[in-house]
Image: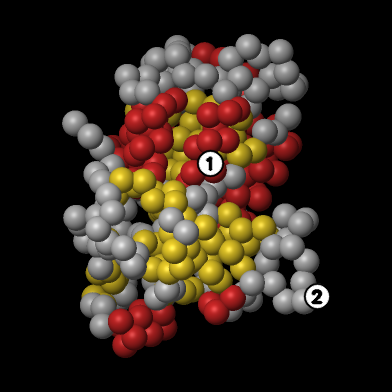
């Protein structure tokens, strides 16, 4: 390459018309002008991407064409939305020394993403080298101002080692405080973890427990001995995101634009598990029933989740 939770109340912010429908249908409480719903904590909310063989999102799929199973048992879809709902999105960016030549391309790609995002989205930034740190100025947790994200990205100076797992963990724990139910991370790295305090299995456990969607981008040189593509693929797969491996700055920019389109075109499905006694890992499968003349539909959502706290102390 050339580079020169279960025991808590969950919050779901949706547009006015959706709030009225949900409150009438499910007896959920709607508050003030923000139309914030307090949802049953047993509810499993899924961000679902449906694309054709060409990778283009497929719109207009009705609720009755989706099928959800958990541990092989069919589930009843209790909530459905095909509307574009705002998200909280965290940029989780490798700022180790090896990223020095790639930082400008990453910043440009983030800028392109911000231009394609929803004006109601919230953002935050985590940079990780020897340890993770938050990038928004003045200790701000989230922002809806793209310029504050750009300033945060520009403030990072690539140096040191790579604490990838700690960076993912910090972002997952931070995003739990978001007022929005749809939560997404974009993880960018060019190498394997060399400095984290936690192990990969703990980072994956937190990802499953959080129900955050994580897109991953690997910026690996062809002769790089520290390639970590397998780990990035695994993080994306279990959370319902997607892994990208751009080979230059333009492909990186295109990947971020594709992620932005994917996020805005996703369906929101929710169900209450029929078996509410099982603890530990649960496996999910979502399918779309095709018509006789329709091409294959590719469905991406998280494949598993864990009942339990996001962070263990």
Between 91 and 61, which is closer to the camera in this rendering? 61
- SS category of the residue bearing label 1: helix
Q: Which label was assigned to residue 293?
A: 2
Alpha carbon distance from label 2 to label 1: 31 Å
Q: Quadrant of residue 75?
A: bottom left
Q: Residue at x 53, y 36 (%)?
A: 234
Image quadrant in which the C terminus is located: top left
Q: Is 31 positioned to the left or the right of 218 in the image? A: left
Q: Nearer the viewer's eye, disc 2 or disc 1?
A: 2
From what the image shows, is residue 169 above or below residue 259?
above
**Farthest front residue?**
72
Residue 230 place in picture, x, y as percent: 58, 28
**Residue 274 image point, x, y percent:** 33, 67
| Left or right: 221, with 94 as reference point | right
Q: Earlier in the sequence, mark 2 or mark 1?
A: 1
Q: How dense is the environment of label 1, judged by Cα within 10 Å: few (below 14), some, or many (20 and up)?
A: many
Tell me residue 227's x, y (percent).
61, 20
| Closer-to-camera residue (243/33) | 243
- Judged from the image, the secondary structure of the residue bearing numbered disc 2 is loop
Residue 260 in view here: yes
Query: In the orientation shown, which residue stands out farthest toward the right?
Result: 293
Report the disc number at residue 236: 1
Mark 2 is surrounded, within 10 Å at the Cα level, by few (under 14), some (14 to 19) or many (20 or more) other residues, namely: few
User: Can residue 46 be seen in the rendering of this structure?
Assistant: no
What residue sits 24% from the left and 44% below the top? 309
Name which quarter of the figure residue 224 lies in.
top right
Q: Please give the name of the residue rendered at 72% of the width and 55% of the height, measured from the top-left corner.
A: 55
Q: Does residue 76 sit above or below 174 in this rendering? A: below
Q: Point out the image quarter for the N terminus.
A: top right
* Location of residue 43 with respect to 122 vertically, above or below: below
Residue 211: % across, % down: 39, 50
């Amino acid at each position: 390459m050339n580079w020169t939770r279960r025991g808590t109340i969950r919050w779901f912010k949706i547009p006015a018309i959706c709030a009225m429908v949900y409150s009438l249908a499910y007896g959920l409480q709607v508050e003030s002008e923000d139309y914030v719903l307090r949802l049953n904590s047993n509810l499993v909310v899924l961000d679902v991407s449906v694309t054709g063989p060409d990778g283009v999102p497929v719109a207009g799929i009705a609720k009755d064409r989706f099928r959800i199973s958990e541990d092989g048992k069919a589930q009843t879809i209790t909530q459905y939305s095909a509307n574009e709902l705002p998200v909280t999105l965290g940029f989780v960016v490798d700022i180790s020394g090896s990223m020095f030549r790639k930082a400008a391309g990453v910043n440009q790609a983030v800028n392109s993403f911000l231009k394609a995002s929803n004006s109601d989205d919230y953002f935050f930034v985590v940079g990780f080298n020897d340890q993770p740190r938050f990038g928004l100025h003045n200790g701000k947790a989230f922002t809806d101002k793209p310029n504050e994200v750009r300033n945060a990205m520009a403030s990072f100076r690539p140096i040191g080692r790579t604490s990838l797992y700690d960076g993912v963990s910090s972002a997952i724990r931070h995003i739990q405080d978001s007022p929005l139910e749809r939560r997404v991370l974009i993880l960018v790295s060019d190498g394997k973890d060399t400095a984290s305090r936690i192990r990969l299995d703990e980072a994956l456990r937190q990802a499953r427990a959080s129900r955050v969607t994580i897109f991953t981008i690997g910026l690996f040189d062809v002769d790089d001995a520290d390639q970590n593509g397998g780990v990035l693929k695994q993080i994306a797969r279990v959370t319902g995101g997607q892994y990208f491996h751009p080979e230059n700055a333009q492909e990186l920019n295109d990947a971020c634009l594709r992620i932005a389109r994917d996020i805005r075109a996703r369906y929101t499905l929710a169900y209450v598990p029929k078996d509410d006694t099982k603890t530990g890992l649960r496996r999910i499968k979502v399918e779309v029933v095709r018509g006789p003349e329709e091409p294959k539909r590719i469905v991406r959502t998280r494949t598993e989740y864990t009942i339990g706290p996001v962070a263990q102390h």
